[in-house]
Amino acid sequence: MKEPQSVKDIAKNSGEPLARIEALEQIPLPPPFDKIDEEPPFAQLTDEEREKYVVLDDTIAVNIPKPKSKEEEDRLVKGFLSGLEKLMTVEDNWTFLQPFEMSMEHCAHCQTCSDACPIYEESGENELYRPMYRSEILRRIYFKYVKKASTKVHGDIDLNWEVVARLIELSYRCNLCRRCAQTCPIGVDNALLSREIRKIASMEMGIVPKELHADGSVLQLKVGSSTGMTPLVVKDNIEFIDEDTAERTGIEIETPWDVQGADILLIHNAGEIMAWPENPGAFATVFEAAGLSWTLSSEIVAYDGINYGVWYDDIQFARVAIKHASAARDLGVKKIVLGECGHAHKALTVIADKILTGDLNIPRESSMVTLRDIIRSGKLKLDPSRNDFPVTLHDPCNLVRLMGIVSPQREILEAILPPGRFREMTPHGVENYCCGGGSGFAIMSGHNFSDWRHRLTGRKKFRQILEAFEDEPMDIEHPKYLCAPCSNCKGQIRDIIAYYDAWEKAGIYYGGLVELIVNAMVDVQPGFIDWEWH
Ligand code: SF4
Ligand code: SF4
């Protein structure tokens, strides 16, 4: 296992990886995946890739080309310092200045946060992935080169282009899950520092992974969705989903579009419409059965709750959030309900609170709460015996840790599962572990990045899933349901299950929460959950 020996190493050995993970030295998984030498291979970067792009470790996320001249090298350093200076001003960073400054100025170096970080743990405690390693580099740059403070007090560091480029790559080795922030005794938020580094890279230097910006925010603002769906296409797709759902349930539905004055504007993550159509179909079935007044919007951007800016760029973030709120205002709805997407929750309910004022400040609600209220209302006739299989629940970080939404989803599960079928992961709720796809990772798979995330960021979650089902026969004859009420988490969980072949080998299947509700509805034909791997 290669790892940096000190914070200062970030400036050394240009072209050499600072850290390497020996896959065979990782902590083995629980049975039946406990033979580490039988795990899928961890693809290595090619010499050509290492030659072309900045090298940090075993993978590449951002694709920063190596500078070809002294001018290009200087531009990286100057751009970074200029961005860092701006982050420390009210004018340029009024949204996050206070927590950023607090996290920069105060760290007791107690290392409590390290124990909380699943990436650090699953890397075999490699120094590069220690939460504080990244933060301390940023702090030293700030104190030495921006604040011109004493290096004796704050620690020394050399600043060259390698430091800048590697630090930007390193900001994309963090899920922004904030598990570390939760444990810090003085409230330092290492995830915020990772995101602020990403902000400097994007907003000041134009450096950002293509999946998040060109294929994400830019596409969403241009055509309406980062999936590429235009308003016409999304309406077509929903029509098809309505027909398909009616065939499966035996209940005719017609998803309402652009209903002026509806109580609820439902915003899905458009990835659901493309990859998991049973989820929007199930929402429509439940909302109709409960007699809600609701609508989708066919306004550009407003039919896709995705907001990738939440991971890397305040301007991109604000543009998308304002589109969401404007569509709701123009329809005159009473509230926005966010579908099963954790980062859409974070974006529109928490972060957007800083920018949605006046008539854009429309109440926003989690679908976990809406669905819980429907269950409580007694409007659905439910037969829990239809869900007679083992179920565990993945808690999306943004729902639980950020927003404290822990009990509604559990109350729903209690109403729709037979006694004894639900088992909690350990730990869960606000103490949960990220799925490993947080901060954009679930949609990033350039080079060998997906191998890196399965082996480093998703491994802890996979371990938890296996432990939750440990008392069950682990084969495909005994299907188990991993309930993940978040589109981003589902993408990551689908990838982990496929990587380890856990459906074929252990019968681990996954899906959302609302699908389980429909599966228990008495008025619906049995078998809404089809157990077909896709
Ligand atoms: S935010 Fe999560 S992934 Fe990032 S350093 Fe903290 S615990 Fe680790
Ligand atoms: S960030 Fe907080 S928990 Fe981590 S070392 Fe600093 S003071 Fe300790």
Image (spheres, rainbow, N blue to C red):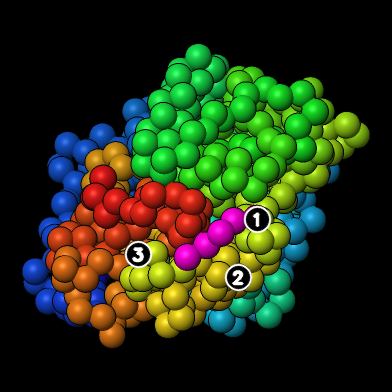
Indicate which disc, 3 or 2, sits on the residue closer to the N terminus: 2
Q: What secondary structure is found at the residue carrying circle 1?
A: loop
SS at badge 3:
strand
Residues tagged 1 and 2 counted as in contact (Cβ below 8 A): no
The CA distance from mark 1 to mark 2 is: 16 Å
Tell me if label 1 and label 3 are in contact, CB under 8 Å. Answer: no
Kindly give the residue lying farthest to the left in the view shown: 38
Q: Residue at x 44, y 49 (%)?
A: 524
Structural crowding at the residue carrying mark 2, measured as other residues with C-alpha within 10 Å and reported as few (<14), some (14–19) or many (≥20): some
Residue situated furthest right in the rendering:
358
Check disc 2 and report its element: helix, strand or loop.
helix
Q: Quadrant of residue 263?
A: top right
Q: Which one is nearer the viewer's eye here, 266 or 529?
A: 529
* Mark 3 nearby-residue class (10 Å; few <14, some 14–19, many ≥20): many
Disc assigned to residue 379 = 1
Say if 256 sits above or below 45 in the image: above
Amino acid type assigned to the residue bearing label 3 in the image: Tyr
Q: Quadrant of the C terminus?
A: top left
Q: Which residue is mark 2?
A: 411
Of the numbered discs in the image, which one, if any, rests on residue 481? Answer: 3
Numbered mark located on residue 245 in the image: none
Q: Can the viewer see residue 64 in this picture?
A: no
- Vertical placement of residue 262 versus 532, above or below: above
Coordinates of residue 53 in the picture (x, y in percent): 30, 38
Camera-side residue of 220 and 190: 220
Amino acid found under the numbered disc labelled 1: Lys
**Residue at x 25% of width, y 66% of height:** 479
Q: Is residue 384 above or below residue 494?
A: below
Vertical order, 418 against 56 (above or below): below
Q: CA distance from mark 3 to mark 2?
A: 17 Å
Range covered by the magenta-colored residues:
379-383
- Residue at 60% over, 41% down: 288
